[in-house]
Image: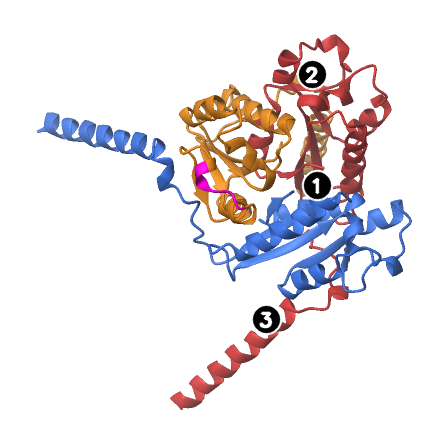
Chain colours: A orange, B blue, C red
Amino acid sequence: MKTSKILFFLAVMFLSGSAFAQTSKMNPADFHGATADKKSYKVVYQLNTDDEKVIKATMRNINNALDDPRLKGKLEVELVVHGGGVAVFKKDQPYEAQLKELQGKGVILAECENTMRERKISRDELFDFISYVPSGNGEIIIRQQQGWAIVHP
Amino acid sequence: MKTSKILFFLAVMFLSGSAFAQTSKMNPADFHGATADKKSYKVVYQLNTDDEKVIKATMRNINNALDDPRLKGKLEVELVVHGGGVAVFKKDQPYEAQLKELQGKGVILAECENTMRERKISRDELFDFISYVPSGNGEIIIRQQQGWAIVHP
Amino acid sequence: MKTSKILFFLAVMFLSGSAFAQTSKMNPADFHGATADKKSYKVVYQLNTDDEKVIKATMRNINNALDDPRLKGKLEVELVVHGGGVAVFKKDQPYEAQLKELQGKGVILAECENTMRERKISRDELFDFISYVPSGNGEIIIRQQQGWAIVHP
């Protein structure tokens, strides 16, 4: 009796072992991405360069995340801008329409106050519909420790 | 009686619904950053380039995070250096004073041992007050899974 | 009696206080990296540029993480490719052998379908052994909120 139980137990272990091997060697064509089974998702996007390519990619990336069928309607986004990234918020730059579109989708637009001081930028130079945070780095850290994801395009 | 209860329930739902709509459409001027209500915060900074601009930005960013009024006195930082980032730790580079200042604030300065082997760098070439970790990538992964935030300037 | 208890309590607090001060001012030579005491680790690597240096660094970084003695045999990796990063999966690029080696080690190779549409790339142009996800950004966000670490080399 005891031996049969042990044999049965070993058989189960062996079978589940090979099942595990099979999933880890699954057919790549069968993988279509992680499943979003949470009720809501939160992400901080970090922008810290005035490189036009990166600025545009960051806004495109945020839109792609918001449009991902898995996250549609349940993703909260905060764009944290520091260092050279401040360019995106400058009135003399061509991003007003895209920023307002993002804001219309609920995206928080947050500029680092440290950057403002370090670069001697006045709030008058930036769009008046943005928010300010004490430091972009602090914001990114606090958000992650509140459970937000981070993406740095 | 029952109907009144249902009406009351619907009214509550309606009111909380509009309250939610209001917070999600809050005035950007009213947002001043996330609240740091945890007792302590931990963050890994990743540096993997010898680009002087990025090296300097990384050290400035760490100082800004440590000085953020929300995190003051409760932020632990580890600077994980790998790849080209090793430049920051080289004796012939001009970062000794800034690194010692960071270390004085409790920042762990960690160099990747893989990089040392791959680039055939001897420990004699680097400042003697730094620490070494088996791999910078492993360190970044383990730290995150221990609950640390990650910032890659 | 009570006074002696209070004195004892204060002494313990004082001693543990100085012990804490000692650990926070530990000798850097005594730090050899975080301890990996979890049973398994998971990480998403983000690749979003066609810069050959970054592509190669990303693959080297993944191998270094898999080989880190602390993570050996217990690290699951997914490489999420979007934007310019799609270059790594193109048949006319020289990365087939390295990608297959990574896949042999269990690394999921995931291409962003948004990028495919935006850049009008046909699946025929990419290696047939990769996987596709609705959006690279969505994938990175969902994975992090499932508890995966993120590394962006």
Q: Is residue B21 above or below residue C34?
A: above
Q: Circle 3: is it few (<14), some (14-19), or many (20+) Cα within 10 Å? A: few
- Position of residue C87 in the picture relative to residue B63 (left or right): right
Please indicate, yes or no, whether residue C119 appears anywhere in the rendered image.
yes
**Identity of the residue drawn at 44% across and 45% down:** B34
Task: For mark 1, give the secondary structure.
Answer: helix
Q: Is residue A114 above or below residue A6?
A: below
Q: In this view, does A16 lie above or below A115?
A: above
Q: Distance between the residues labelled 2 and 3?
A: 52 Å
Taking depth in this image into account, of C52 and B143 the one nearest to the observer is C52
The three-letter amino acid code for the residue at tag 1 is Thr
- Which one is in front in this view, the residue at disc 1 or the one at disc 2? 2
Q: Mark 3 lies on which chain?
A: C
Magenta stretch secondary structure, dominant: loop
Is label 1 in contact with label 2 (beta carbons under 8 Å)?
Answer: no
Q: Which chain carries label 2?
A: A
Image coordinates of residue B47 in percent, x first then y, are: 71, 46
**Residue range corresponding to the magenta coloring:** A120-124
Q: Circle 1: is it few (<14), some (14-19), or many (20+) Cα within 10 Å? A: few
Image coordinates of residue B148 in percent, x first then y, are: 59, 49
The quarter of the image holding the N terminus of chain B is: top left
- Position of residue B46 in the picture relative to residue C61 (left or right): left
Labels 2 and 3 in the same subunit: no
Image coordinates of residue C28 in percent, x first then y, are: 74, 64
- Residue under label 3: C20
Q: Which mark is residue B29?
A: none
- The answer to if A27 sits in the magenta stretch is no
Labels 1 and 2 in the same subunit: yes
Q: Number of labelled discs?
A: 3
